[in-house]
Image (cartoon, rainbow, N blue to C red):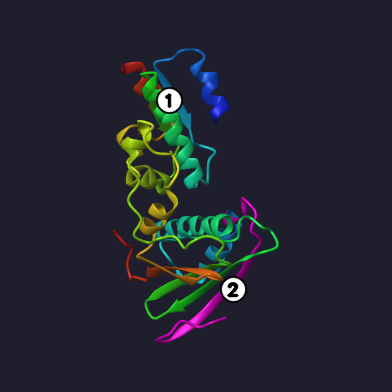
Amino acid sequence: MNAAYAEAEAKNPETILLNFEEVDYINSTGIALIVSLLAKARASKRRLLAYGLSDHYVEIFNITRLSDFVSILPDEESALSEVSVS
Amino acid sequence: MTSPSSGARRPLAELSIPSEPGNERGAAEQVARAVSGLGLPERTLERLKTAVAEATMNAMEHGNRYNPEIPVKIQVWLLEERLLVRIIDRGGSPPPSPNAQRPDLEAKLEGMQTPRGWGLFLIRNMVDDMRVSGNPDHHTVELITYLKSDDDAG
């Protein structure tokens, strides 16, 4: 995930999308990684969007308050729409 | 298998998980299979799996120092109106405190705290009760999920 983020960041975008459609397991180590990426994004004044999370992991994003800082969309289409209007 | 102290109880599973990174996921799946006949709501089951995975990961890392020759023991019990999962390690480090401070996301984002430290927080929020006990030789974490007649809203 770090490598993918670095590759996306190299293009200097305003927004980076995190695709969780193929992710069926996130543990506390993964949460820490997402927190690190979010910290990097904030330092660079970039916005993070996440899509494709299952209901369970949307709940985890909510209880950890990651959803206060990372916009959560249901799918790629809605995420891309969110980027295009912002 | 040491039985819990009171009321009607039925053992559903006893597992031995080698303390290697990644094995917590299989442990959670095995616990899910053990309770598959109870008709738990999907949300409750996913929360239980997360709690079991996190507690097992803690046991493997902090209790057993990721020594694959020292397994984490997991017991699953059906009690009256409760499901009890015990995760037992060999106690290499002090047991986790169930009252550990809530992670401060803003502090972590500002670099004032490590990004880590979410495990116990997730466990406490995924089950109805968590109890920790132990001695220098072993630690036991007990995860309790109340069995409700309808889907929990909690």
Q: Residue A56's x, y, as percent?
A: 41, 49
Q: How would you rate the neighbour count of disc 1 (Cα within 10 Å): few for under 14, some for 14-19, many for 20 or more?
A: some
B123, above or below B110, in the image: below
Residue A80 location (% of width, % of height): 41, 22
The quarter of the picture where the N terminus of chain B appears is: bottom right
Q: Residues within 10 Å of mark 2 (few under 14, many from 20)?
A: some
Q: Residue furthest top?
A: A11
Spatial separation of the CA atoms under disc 2 and disc 1: 43 Å
Q: Which residues are magenta?
A: B1-24
Mark 1: amino acid: Lys
Q: Secondary structure at mark 2?
A: strand
Asked if B48 appears above or below B106 in the picture, the reply is below
- What residue is disc 2 on? B14
Chain letter for mark 2 = B
Residue A73 in magenta stretch: no
Q: Is residue B16 magenta?
A: yes
- How many tags in the picture? 2
Q: Residue at x 47, y 63 (%)?
A: B95
